[in-house]
Amino acid sequence: MLVLAGALVVLISVLGGYVLSHGQLAALWQPYELLIIFGGAIGAFIAANSSAVVKASLREIAALPKGPSYRKQDYLDLLSLLYDIFTVMRKQGVLGMESHIEDPEASPVFSKYPRLLGEHHLVEFITDCLRLIVGGNMEAHELEQLLDAELETHHTEAEVPAHAVQTMADALPGFGIVAAVLGIVVTMANLSDDTSQVGAHVAGALVGTFLGILLCYGFIGPLASAMEGRVREDGKAFECVKVGLLANLRGYNPKVAVEFARKVLSSTSRPSFNELEDHLNGAGA
């Protein structure tokens, strides 16, 4: 929602300042300039990216008003899930998790958290890590290297849509100049027929440069930054799982391992120690 609020502030500030300085809003309405700028930028965006990236970008943009995928309640559930997993592994050994990871939806451990079950990538990451622990007989440092490589790949892929939109934003001032130059070309071509509208035509051409810069720095650029921030925040859930699993593998008891995982989370969404304690007691009741 902050993305929409920010865009509205930009629009009101720029147009308000323009009107207060005795500018005419009608002079800024140049639909053909918008067609050149937006059409060119979107065409370049489609040409530069695969269909998967284009679709992912549209999904990410549509999801921005909803905020991060994981909120404090989701992190409470995730930490509780990790605690339940570590408790099973402590009581039954690592092989005790074998049946749970083969069918998470039927597992009494995973099924306690239906919201998390809907996050297929996160559940797959958890179960894949547990498979390595159950069947791989890996040391903590070996698993850490593997998980770091996987998370780096995951984060890089997740940030591709944001980088693609940022690249489109960077191209907008250039397309604004293109629109302005074409406007000047039209003005010069009609100069021999009617010179009374030269000022209006030149002003319309300059609007192209203005629109390209405004769209880049006022709208599309911030949109790309918001997408990147959302991806970075959502990646904390995977970091949380990694740190918790490694702490458990190093022999810490379930509550301490979960505390390791909690510390990874951002301060804005991280549940407090007491909140987690109350949630664990309520889940176990």
Image (spheres, rainbow, N blue to C red):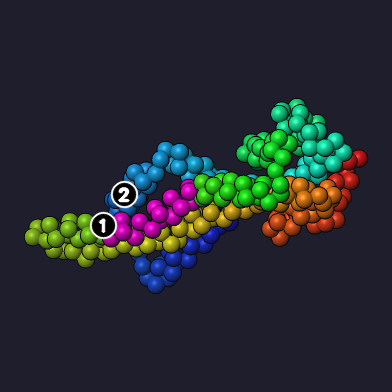
Per the picture, the main secondary structure of the magenta-coloured stretch is: helix
Under mark 2, the amino acid is Gly
Q: Position of residue 192 (x, y in %)?
A: 8, 60
Q: Which residues are magenta?
A: 160-178
Pick whichever of labels 1 and 2 is earlier in the sequence: 2
At 85% from the left and 56% from the top, the residue drawn is: 274
Give the image quarter of residue 135. Answer: top right
Task: Out of 59 and 167, give the one closest to the viewer.
Answer: 167
Image spot of residue 145 (x, y percent)? 62, 50
Residue 246 seen in the figure: yes
Label 1 to label 2: alpha-carbon separation: 9 Å
State left or right for residue 97 relative to residue 121. right
> Is 174 one of the magenta-colored residues?
yes
**Residue lying at 48% horizontally and 54% vertically, measured from the top left:** 224
Q: Residues within 10 Å of mark 1 (few under 14, many from 20)?
A: many
Mark 2, secondary structure of its residue: helix
Relative image position of residue 93 (x, y in whole percent) = 82, 37
Q: Which mark is residue 202?
A: none
Q: Quarter of the image holding residue 102?
A: top right
The structure residue drawn at horizontal position 85% and vertical position 46%, both measured from the top left corner, is 280
Q: Do callouts 1 and 2 mark residues in contact (Cβ within 8 Å)? A: yes
Q: Position of residue 152 (x, y in %)?
A: 56, 50
Residue tagged by mark 2?
40
Q: Residue at x 37, y 62 (%)?
A: 213
Residue 178's tag is: 1
